[in-house]
Image (cartoon, helix red, strand yellow):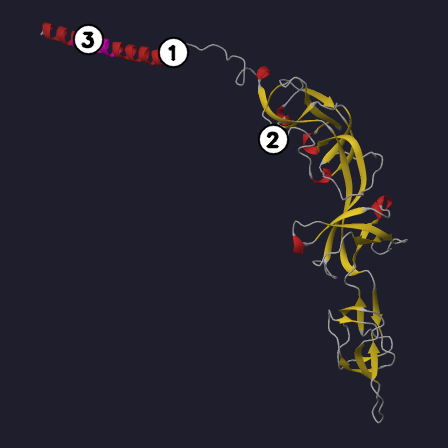
Amino acid sequence: MADKKGKTIIIVAAVILATILAIFLINATNKAKKGGRGGKPGKGMWGGAGDTVTSVKTVVAEKTTLHDYILTNGDVETQSSIEVFPSIGGKVVQTLVSLGSQVKAGDVIAYVDPSEPGSYYAKSPVTAPISGSIISTPMKSGQTVSTSSVITKIGDIANLQITAYVPERYIGDIRLGLKAEVTFEAYAGVLFTATVVRISPVVDAATRTKEIVLHFDQKDDRLNAGMFAKVKLYTVDYEGQIAIQQDALVNSNDKYYLYVTTDGETVQKREVSLGKNVASYYQILSGVNEGEKVVVEGMLTLADGGKIKDITNGATSVLESKPENMENPPEGAPKDAPKKGGKPQ
């Protein structure tokens, strides 16, 4: 009996030892797979916080010309037109023209019957005082007219103009001879050019605008009286200016900064003085020199002295990446000295 108990104890002890040994071997194997403690990260893209390299895009600061402009709308009209009135009141009994008809001076365009009940008069002809095209026919046959009623309107559709209106706050920039680019929804992507030839001497008290008239620089059969025009009126050229896109500016405590790299590996955070704002670009009065590279993408995570990797492709200068407002305006656009502009919003 004692031998059986002894054997049982030995077996149990052996099982326990075997279990402990198995656990020890498993742990040792796992540690071997994981390896020992690694060293500190090295320098480079994945190095410590102080060695972080930020991918950025840059442009070279170069002197260019900013073309300031005003956007407004207008209507295409004939340069010369005249309203035609009857010489006597009565009923329009016949019209001989329609919209777009060509007439010569002296042509009969309508007849008016001045007869009243119980009396009879000869029909009175209404004649065209000038040659041109019928551009309006407000009166139709059967309508009663007086000597102050407009029978029709005649205009010279070969020579067209644009009548537009400029807000009061911009009238200081308006003068005769300004050049404009004109676009129409009917001709997407097509630019027409025009010149300011007349400026109203007064501001409309109701709309707070001033009327201007522009003549097209070239005749074009695609243009028609009555069309709605979008007018881009060039007002001032700012020549020889360093200009940087607004998105590159960093605002801190009401001051504005740009990140500049002189070695292609690190950046300097520089305070800049801003001048004129034209569309999405700002004139840089001080803080950046011509020929220096300015960060225009990736600057949000940068700090003064931070390391960078320049991944710029394609355009590498302001001149190559210039927006619409920096393209050449129509020939003869005005030139003037720079004026101080506002700050980015």
Identify the secondary structure beneath mark 1: loop
Q: Is residue 31 left or right of residue 266?
A: left
Q: Which mark is residue 97?
A: none
Q: Nearer the viewer, residue 42 or 78?
A: 78
What amino acid is labelled 2 in the image? Gly
Q: Which quadrant, please, contains the C terminus?
A: top right
Q: Nearer the viewer, mark 2 or mark 1?
A: 2
Q: CA distance from mark 1 to mark 3?
A: 32 Å
Q: Is residue 87 left or right of residue 137?
A: right
Residue appearing at x 16%, y 9% in the figure: 11
Residue 255, picture quadrant: top right
In magenta segment, residue 185? no
Residue 211 in percent (x, y) is at 84, 54
Q: Is residue 272 above or below residue 13?
A: below
Q: Circle 2: is it few (<14), some (14-19), or many (20+) Cα within 10 Å? A: few
Residue appearing at x 84%, y 48% in the figure: 168
Q: Circle 3: is it few (<14), some (14-19), or many (20+) Cα within 10 Å? A: few
Q: Which residues are magenta?
A: 11-19
- The residue under label 3 is 14
| Residue furthest right as drawn | 201
Choose the circle earlier in sequence order: 2 or 3: 3
- The residue under label 1 is 35
- The residue under label 2 is 314
